[in-house]
Image (cartoon, rainbow, N blue to C red):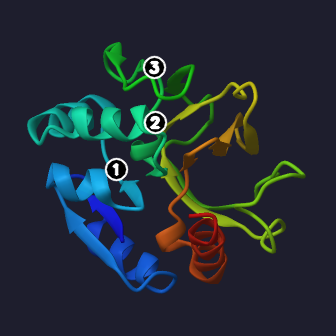
Amino acid sequence: MIAILDYGSGNLRSAQRAFEVASANVVVTRDAKTCSEASALIVPGVGAFAACMEQLAQVRGVEIIADRVAKARPIFGICVGMQILFQSSSEKKETQGLGVLPGKVSELKAPVLPHMGWNSVAPAHNSKLFKGVEDQPFYFVHSYAAKNSIPDATNTITNYGEDFLAAVEKDFVVATQFHPEKSGAAGAKLIANWVKTL
């Protein structure tokens, strides 16, 4: 079973539909036991970093994710759900993240924000996530991003005004700044690739 963490942020139903194409058993839940026992946990997210952290705390999501990290159980962060896995963000005010991934999130240096639309990416040669869709664009909607590659991780880079992390694969954690659930056939293939690793 794959659990999608419902903490009041993210495109929950579209994410559920997208992941159901690759896995028959997908639930949207905030139940700690279900999230702990699931074979994988999806952490979605839209909007502001600080607001997502507050909403996460209200449903004990910080503890739910920490429990999975302690047990090295698979986690997939999407958009702001990726960003909150980092140590901090400078959006509006300095806000602490979950610290699952090293580094901070900051505003993109680009002439027009938000970055909204399709962008090509440059996956690492050893990426399992992008197998078969290395040359495909994915759908982004954001103004902030993590910009530094993570040591001992498979880093996928893209550029909008400057280079930033489009995706990270590190041990049991996968995260994408783009929305695979809004990225058509390429997003569906990427999700299927990830499900095969579970």
Q: Quadrant of the N terminus?
A: bottom left
Q: Which mark is residue 62?
A: none
Can residue 155 be seen by looking at this rendering? Answer: yes
Residue 122 position, x and y percent, is: 82, 51
Q: How many marks?
A: 3
Q: Amino acid at mark 3?
A: Gln
Residue 59 pos. (x, y %): 11, 42
Real-space CA distance between mark 1 and mark 2, rounded to the nearest whole angstrom: 9 Å
Examine the rendered structure and indicate whether residue 181 appears above or below residue 154: below
| Residue occupying the point 35% across, 13% down | 94
Kind of residue indicated by mark 1: Gly
Check whether the beta carbons of the residues at disc 1 and disc 2 lie within 8 A of each other. yes
Label 2 amino acid?
Answer: Gln
Q: Which numbered disc flags the more N-terminal residue, 1 or 2?
A: 1
Q: Is disc 3 surrounded by few (<14), some (14 to 19) or many (20+) residues within 10 Å? A: some
Q: Which residue is mark 1?
A: 45
Is 173 or 150 nearer to us in this picture? Answer: 173
- Which residue corresponds to mark 2? 83
Dividing the image into 4 quarters, which one contains the C terminus? bottom right
Q: Which residue is mark 3?
A: 87
- Callout 1: 10 Å neighbours few (<14), some, many (20+)? many
Residue at (76%, 29%) from the top-left corner?
152
Q: Secondary structure at mark 2?
A: helix
Pointer 3 with pointer 2, Cβ within 8 A:
no
Label 3 and label 2: CA atoms lie apart by: 9 Å
Is label 1 in a helix, a strand or a loop? loop
